[in-house]
Image: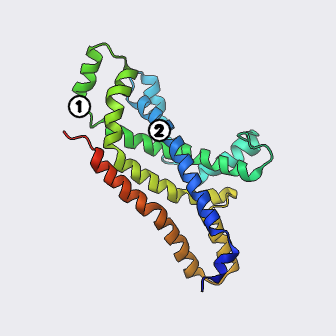
Amino acid sequence: MFDFLADYDLLGAFWTTVQLALLAAVGSLIWGTVLAAMRVGPVPLMRGIGTTYVNTVRNIPLTVIILFASLGLYQTLNISLGAGEDFEALNFRLAVLGLILYTSAFVCEALRSGINTVPVGQAEAARAIGLSFGQVLRLVVLPQAFRSSVVPLANVLIALTKNTTVAAAIGVTEAALVMKEMIENEAQLLLISAVIAFGFVVLTLPTGLILGWVGKKVAVKR
């Protein structure tokens, strides 16, 4: 019943999905942290930029962002991200970039919710002893915010893993693209869907359970 799976590189496709998710998760965490700092910062211009970015990107479909990365950055502006003429690597990098631009908005909001749990008095006390805004954020606020945001960030990571399927729109050979190829060539729609669904459950369920446990262990007791 599963003999047809041998004709497709399903494990390789899921490995590409994992790579997309991990690279985008790291990039989103970095850019999302910067956006969160901008949104709670003392400079009105920076707050405005951060707020506009988050509210705009969250309301744009991910497919549009991924297609913009391919059609806009590469085909229009000729930005290849160092991939040269290697179109497989180019599409992969553009997909990672699109996922980062999109997911960082949700990371920002998850972190901002964690920042809001930090008592205002702690930040005021830190400023009273002469710490700058950056030092207060880095030494006092963000460490507690990250501990409070583990579970929301886990949900963002799970959503990111599922969102990697959109990369198929620009030809990245991940699980969704292989699924489409199998459905076109095989008369096994329900079986193929079940296999792909099981693969994503294997990827996301342990992530949710582990990070949920970590969130309980590192939560700030107040």
Above or below residue 186? Residue 27 is above
Above or below residue 3? Residue 220 is above
Above or below residue 130? Residue 90 is below
**Res 113 seen here:** no
For the view shown, which residue lies furthest in the left direction?
Answer: 222
Is the residue marked by circle 1 packed among few (<14), some (14-19), or many (20+) residues within 10 Å?
few
> Which residue is pictured at 43% across the width and 40% down the height?
108
> Which residue is pictured at 65% across the width and 58% down the height?
169
Q: Amino acid at mark 2?
A: Gly
**Res 210 seen here:** yes
Task: Describe the element under mark 2 as helix, strand or loop.
Answer: helix
Of residues 192 and 212, the one drawn nearer to the viewer in this rendering: 212
Q: Which residue is mark 1?
A: 119
Question: Can you tell which mark lies on residue 108?
Answer: none
N-term-proximal mark, 2 vs 1? 2
For marks 2 and 1, give the CA distance.
Answer: 22 Å
Q: How many marks?
A: 2
Residue 155 relative to residue 218: left or right:
right
Where is residue 35 shown, x and y percent of the image?
46, 34
For the view shown, which residue lies furthest in the right direction?
Answer: 85
Question: Can you tell which mark lies on residue 32?
Answer: 2
Based on the displayed image, in which of its 4 quarters is residue 63 positioned?
Answer: bottom right
> Which residue is pictured at 45% across the width and 56% down the height?
158
Q: Amino acid at mark 1?
A: Pro
Task: Describe the element under mark 1 as helix, strand or loop.
Answer: loop
Residue 135 relative to residue 177: left or right:
left
Where is residue 206 shown, x and y percent of the image?
41, 61
> Which residue is pictured at 34% across the width and 34% down the height?
143
Residue 25 relative to residue 135: left or right:
right
Based on the displayed image, in which of its 4 quarters is residue 175 positioned?
Answer: bottom right
Of residues 13 and 189, the one drawn nearer to the viewer in this rendering: 13
